[in-house]
Amino acid sequence: MRIKWFGHSAFEIESGDTRILIDPFISNNPVCSTAVEEFEPDVICVTHGHADHLGDAMEIADRSGALLIANHELSVFFSRQGLESNGMNIGGTVNLDDIRIRMVDAKHSSDIDFTEEVTSGGSACGFIIETGKGRSIYHAGDTGLFIDMRDVIGEIYRPDIALLPIGDRYTMGPEDAAIAASWLRPEKVLPMHYNTFPVIEQDPQIFAELVKRSSPGTEVVVLEVGGIYEE
């Protein structure tokens, strides 16, 4: 399994022959140097409708033929653009060969904010991706701290790896994200959604120190943009 970070909340997960792209904010991402044309995913997961998360999802899907996975409202929007899309909702799952994608809650807004008029984007979400190798990755999307991270995601789904926002202002900051890590108890946690813009500047080492104190069994993996975690 291979996880590559493209800055902000954009990740590509490779498991076996399947490539899953999450929140592909690429062409307008000031910290990402990868060209949109380089992406050839099989699946694109979108956590919510904001431009810095939906990003280049439609262009990449149109060119590559990737399946888009999102909440029901975004799926309807994608289908109206002529794209193949699977809609789902909180608690639902989509099975793709040996990959299982589960949608979980997130506390955030989700309206589509890049069209001429802001339109409904349904509810924001996170995803738990369960691989055929028995490993699970939780992408929290944009979210504040909420108790289901402990009582549902941590206790029931028990992700091995968590991708958590630490930027503050629009999501959790380092302190709340460290609490989330202590509730989730993953083996590894990768910080995301920080240092893309001045308003969300953070030092990920502060987050790492907080996690070390509150959740010593969890290792913080700080990736550079373009960096890879592999196992």
Image (cartoon, rainbow, N blue to C red):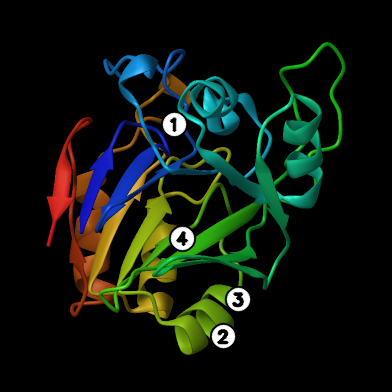
How many angstroms separate mark 3 from mark 4 (CA)?
12 Å
User: Which quadrant: the C terminus?
Assistant: bottom left
Instruction: Please state which amino acid type lies under the numbered disc 3.
Output: Ile
Looking at marks 1 and 3 on the same chain, the residue that comes earlier in the sequence is marked by 3
How many angstroms separate mark 2 from mark 3 (CA)?
6 Å
Q: Position of residue 12 (x, y in %)?
A: 33, 42
The residue that label 4 is drawn on is 176
Residue 27 lies in what quarter of the image?
Answer: top left
x 19%, y 80%: residue = 217
In the rendered structure, the answer to whether residue 53 lies left or right of residue 217 reads: right
Instruction: Please state which amino acid type lies under the numbered disc 4.
Output: Asp
Q: Is residue 29 above or below residue 44?
A: above
Characterize the local packing of mark 4: few (<14), some (14-19) or many (20 or more) Cα atoms within 10 angstroms.
some
How many angstroms separate mark 2 from mark 4 (CA)?
16 Å
Q: Do labels 2 and 3 touch, CB within 8 Å?
A: yes
Characterize the local packing of mark 3: few (<14), some (14-19) or many (20 or more) Cα atoms within 10 angstroms.
few
Q: Position of residue 226 (x, y in %)?
A: 20, 31
Kind of element beneath mark 4: helix
- Residue 147's disc number: 3
How many angstroms separate mark 1 from mark 2 (CA)?
28 Å
The residue that label 1 is drawn on is 200
x 37%, y 55%: residue = 163
- Residue 181's disc number: none
Q: Position of residue 160 (x, y in %)?
A: 30, 74
Q: Is residue 189 above or below residue 196?
A: below
User: Which quadrant: the N terminus?
Assistant: bottom left
The residue that label 2 is drawn on is 151
